[in-house]
Image (tube, helix red, strand yellow):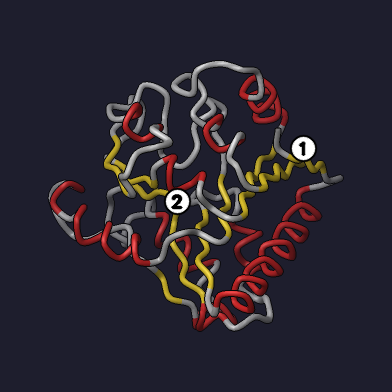
């Protein structure tokens, strides 16, 4: 069962999660000489990422990756990488190394090998921050996605997986459940009553295919859910 942390407002949530993540990255740097951070896309975590970019740690020893990405170039308004460059990869964090989740190609399968190699070298993740949709998806592990069973295999050897899902306008690339669950510290960031209701449903025992976030909520290491209305 994850730790559930409720905040009085979203500003306080963003400040606290930024402080927690920065402290865990610092611990990883001190203990292992470097740290790997995985963060979500979308607009919800943007204030947290901006705050984190100002953290006084040795960002030159931090590798940053997304948890998932839409298969679109950075010039696209829908690019998570673009948003990451505009939020986290600023201020002190400009010294961090960004591990790409996109290369120009017609399909994600064409560049999967190269992208996977770079990501695999940065594993395991020291700090993983995830979002969750109202449909209980996390990263790009969507209910009814074409390769969901493969992505949810907690014993699988895969690192990065192309994913296509109903309602998703373009293909995605996502870290697999096995990689996400192996993170040393996991944070789930959610806001709004709709997502709180979805979380409560996900905490009820049931198949991960119906609520993919379940594979993260029962991960072996510390999982904290950060919530504000």
| Residue at the right extreme of this rendering | 8
Q: Residues within 10 Å of mark 1 (few under 14, many from 20)?
A: some
Q: Position of residue 40 (x, y in %)?
A: 51, 51
Which residue is painted at 27% across and 41% down in the image? 162
Q: Is residue 70 left or right of residue 38?
A: left
| Residues at discs 1 and 2 in contact (Cβ within 8 Å) | no
Q: Position of residue 180 (x, y in %)?
A: 48, 46
Residue corresponding to mark 1: 229
**Foreground residue among 211 and 81:** 211
Q: Identify the secondary structure beneath mark 2.
A: loop
Residue corresponding to mark 2: 67
Viewer-nearest of discs 1 and 2: 2
Q: Identify the secondary structure beneath mark 1.
A: loop
Q: Is residue 208 left or right of residue 171?
A: right
Which residue is painted at 70% across and 42% down in the image? 225
Q: Is residue 17 left or right of residue 139?
A: right
């Amino acid at each position: 069962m994850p730790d559930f942390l409720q905040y009085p407002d979203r500003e306080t949530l963003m400040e606290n999660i930024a402080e927690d993540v920065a402290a865990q990255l610092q611990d990883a740097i001190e203990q292992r000489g470097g740290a790997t951070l995985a963060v979500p896309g979308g607009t919800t975590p943007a204030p947290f990422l901006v705050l984190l970019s100002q953290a006084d740690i040795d960002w030159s020893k931090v590798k940053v990756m997304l948890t998932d990405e839409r298969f679109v170039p950075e010039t696209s308004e829908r690019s998570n990488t673009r948003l990451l460059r505009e939020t986290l990869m600023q201020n002190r964090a400009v010294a961090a190394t960004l591990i790409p989740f996109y290369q120009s190609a017609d399909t994600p399968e064409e560049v999967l090998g190269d992208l996977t190699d770079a990501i695999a070298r940065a594993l395991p993740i020291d700090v993983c921050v995830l979002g969750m949709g109202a449909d209980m998806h996390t990263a790009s592990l969507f209910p009814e996605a074409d390769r969901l069973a493969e992505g949810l295999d907690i014993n699988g050897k895969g690192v990065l997986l192309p994913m296509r899902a109903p309602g998703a306008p373009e293909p995605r690339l996502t870290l697999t459940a096995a990689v996400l669950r192996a993170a040393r510290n996991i944070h789930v960031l959610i806001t709004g009553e709709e997502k709180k209701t979805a979380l409560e449903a996900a905490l009820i025992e049931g198949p991960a295919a119906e609520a993919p976030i379940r594979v993260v909520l029962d991960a072996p290491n510390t999982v904290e859910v950060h919530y504000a209305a």
